[in-house]
Structure formats: C-alpha cells, structure tokens
C-alpha cells in the first residue's frame, strides 16, 4: 500500500498541506526492510519533523505507522506492531 492508497482510505481533510507533504515524503523514504529499520526510520522522521516545528496528532501518527507497516513483510510487520505496543505501554 502506498501513500495515495492510505490517503484515500483515511479522512485527511483536516491535515494541513505541509503535513501531507511531509507524510508523502516519509512514505517514499522507507520501502521494505525490517522492523528495526522501520523503527529507525520513524525516529528519524520524528526528529526531522520536530526540528521543522511539525507536530502530528494521534491519527496522523497512526497514518504514518500504517504507511511504514504496509511496506514490511507480514512477519516483520508483526514484529514492528509488537514493538509499538510495548512502547505505548511504557509511555503510560
């Protein structure tokens, strides 16, 4: 699934054009790979966005994760989802 597929499947009407451009650029950065590479990409993207003063809502972050997860094999996607759940639990 690519950015356009996710874009069309999500309600993106409330997302600014700047954020959509950032999300699209992010979706092109990572294709394939494994769960660790995906997490590294996500951290890099988050740091880059923060430096540019771009913040994302929970639904926007979910869209980023969906883009990244869909670029992984089913096995690696499962590993990444486990890592994400663990990180969410640690945040609480």
Image (spheres, rainbow, N blue to C red):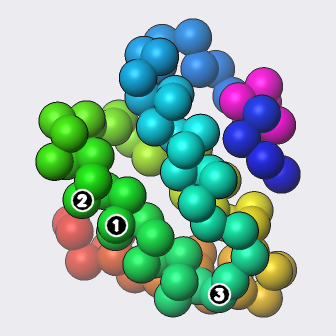
Pick whichever, 90 or 3, lies toward us. 3
Q: Mark 1 to mark 2: distance in Å?
A: 5 Å
> Residue under circle 1?
44
- Crowding at dot 3, Cα within 10 Å, few <14 / some 14-19 / many 20+, comes out as some
> Residue under circle 2?
47
Q: Give the image location of residue 76, x and y in percent.
A: 71, 86
Q: Give the image location of residue 19, x and y in percent.
A: 42, 28
Q: Which residue: 22% across, 68% down?
A: 91
The reply to whether the C-beta atoms of the residues labelled 1 and 2 are less than 8 Å apart is yes
Q: Which of marks 3 and 1 is nearer the N terminus?
A: 3
**Residue 36 in view (yes/no):** yes
Q: Which residue: 78% across, 25% down?
A: 8
Q: Which residue: 59% across, 39% down?
A: 24
Depth-wise, is mark 3 or mark 1 nearer the camera?
1
Residue 41 falls inside the magenta stretch: no
Q: Give the image location of residue 10, x and y in percent.
A: 68, 28
Q: Mark 3 to mark 2: distance in Å?
A: 20 Å
Corner quadrant of residue 68? bottom right
- Left or right placement of residue 70 versus residue 55 in this view: right
Which type of secondary structure does the marked residue at label 3 adopt? Answer: loop
């Amino acid at each position: 699934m690519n950015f356009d597929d996710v874009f069309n499947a999500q309600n993106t009407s409330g997302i600014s054009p700047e954020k959509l451009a950032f999300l699209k650029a992010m979706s092109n950065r990572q294709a394939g790979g494994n769960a660790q590479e995906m997490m590294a990409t996500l951290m890099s993207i988050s740091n880059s966005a923060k430096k540019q003063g771009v913040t994302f809502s929970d639904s926007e972050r979910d869209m980023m994760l969906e883009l990244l997860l869909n670029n992984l094999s089913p096995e690696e996607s499962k590993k990444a989802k486990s890592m994400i759940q663990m990180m969410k639990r640690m945040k609480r």
